[in-house]
């Protein structure tokens, strides 16, 4: 007897793909075959998709509002719709699941046309534009945050609060936080999400180079750096005499997060959720200029409970970061309290709750 099939649609960023991986792991344990539908190769993040197959469907994100840009995006999405419809007809899924972003529009609209029930998951504290469109259709809406902007008028019967699914590797890495000693190693982890963040290469080396010599001697730094910035960042740390491990991508990032006394990162939904489940204090620097300020909302939610500190990029200077790191390194109790507060809002059972919603929906 063949297994029931669930198809997961996720855009091509780690923020969309990582929760898709987490859900595939859980559904696999429950006896489902899981296919991924995306616009990119899933293995670009160094993790094999834990399912039966991965399918690429043409898609596009609207960039600009000129008639030409809109026409190009619409044409690509229409091609993706026909491709996704043929794929659904062939694979006959019981349920479709979408994790947001324009690349989820073709497969989920195709599911609606084919009569396949679907669930959309909103990772951020702000409902994304693609999910807002899909929320108008017959489906279920799973949320990470209880108060999610732009969802005020949704039918309460459609909405379920589940949290943010995280991968098994994150749950396995979760260990109690240990504060840094007054003279021992101080572990600092800096990363910018799956795509990296150039601002960290611009700001962090100068900030750390100006720290007191005794703290520089204690510092154990791990930093994600884009390939094009690697040489200049490595030279800066060598000149400053700082012990730094640099990489363009860390496939074992959850373990590195768990080993950190302090994290400096963007505030995408996956990053915030994983940091909370691990219970690690963080300085969040939200991605600026986002249409809906979703990362600022995510970071603010954690800051409000005392689990971290939000510094907007316009205020993220070497001097400001140096001041914060110096202060927190000297206040291990402050770090421990922030770790406890962050852990209090983590939801390790999110993936199971989302899988339960999917099982309720299957045809």
Image (cartoon, rainbow, N blue to C red):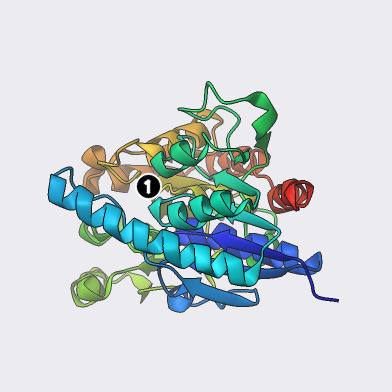
Quarter of the image for residue 299 reads top left
Image vertical order of residue 247 relative to residue 339, above or below: below
Side of 268 relative to 207 (left or right): right
Side of 159 relative to 270 (left or right): right
Give SS at disc 1.
Answer: helix
Please, which residue is most extreme toward the top here?
153
Quarter of the image for residue 65 reads top left
Image vertical order of residue 145 relative to residue 120, above or below: above
Q: Where's the N terminus, which quadrant?
A: bottom right
The foreground one among 142 and 280 is: 142
Q: Position of residue 209 (x, y in %)?
A: 25, 60
Can the viewer see residue 306? yes
Q: Position of residue 252 (x, y in %)?
A: 54, 73
Q: Which residue is mark 1?
A: 326
The foreground one among 319 and 93 is: 93
Image vertical order of residue 170 relative to residue 363, above or below: below
**Residue drawn 35% across the image and 43% down it:** 286
**Residue drawn 44% across the image and 49% down it:** 268
């Amino acid at each position: 007897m063949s297994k029931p099939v669930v198809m997961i649609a996720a855009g091509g960023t780690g923020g969309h793909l990582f929760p898709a991986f987490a859900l595939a792991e859980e559904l696999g344990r429950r006896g489902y075959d899981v296919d991924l539908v995306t616009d990119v190769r899933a293995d670009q993040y160094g993790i094999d998709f834990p399912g039966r197959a991965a399918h690429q469907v043409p898609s596009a994100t609207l960039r600009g509002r000129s008639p030409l840009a809109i026409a190009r995006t619409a044409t690509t999405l229409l091609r993706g719709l026909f491709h996704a419809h043929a794929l659904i007809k062939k694979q006959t899924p019981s349920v479709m699941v979408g994790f947001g972003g324009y690349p989820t529009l073709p497969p989920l609209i195709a599911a609606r046309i084919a009569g396949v029930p679907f669930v959309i998951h909103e990772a951020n504290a702000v409902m994304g534009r693609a999910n807002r469109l899909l929320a108008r259709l017959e489906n279920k809406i799973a949320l990470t945050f209880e108060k999610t902007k732009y969802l005020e008028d949704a039918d309460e019967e459609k909405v379920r609060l589940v949290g943010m699914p995280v991968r098994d590797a994150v749950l396995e890495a979760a260990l109690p936080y240990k504060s840094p000693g007054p003279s021992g190693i101080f572990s600092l982890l800096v990363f910018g999400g799956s795509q990296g963040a150039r601002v960290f290469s611009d700001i962090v080396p100068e900030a750390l180079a100006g720290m007191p010599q005794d703290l520089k001697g204690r510092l154990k730094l791990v930093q994600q750096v884009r390939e094009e910035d690697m040489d200049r960042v490595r030279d800066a740390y060598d000149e400053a005499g700082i012990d730094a491990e640099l990489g363009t991508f860390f496939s074992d990032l959850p373990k590195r997060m768990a080993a950190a006394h302090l994290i400096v990162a963007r505030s995408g939904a996956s990053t915030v959720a994983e940091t909370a489940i691990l219970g690690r204090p963080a300085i969040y620097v939200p991605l600026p200029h986002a249409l809906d300020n979703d990362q600022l909302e995510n970071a603010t939610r954690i800051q409000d409970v005392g689990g971290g500190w939000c510094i907007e990029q316009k205020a993220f200077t070497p001097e400001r970061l140096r001041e914060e790191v110096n202060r927190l390194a000297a206040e291990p109790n402050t770090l421990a309290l922030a770790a406890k507060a962050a852990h209090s809002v983590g939801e390790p059972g999110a993936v199971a709750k989302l899988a339960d919603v999917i099982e309720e929906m299957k045809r």
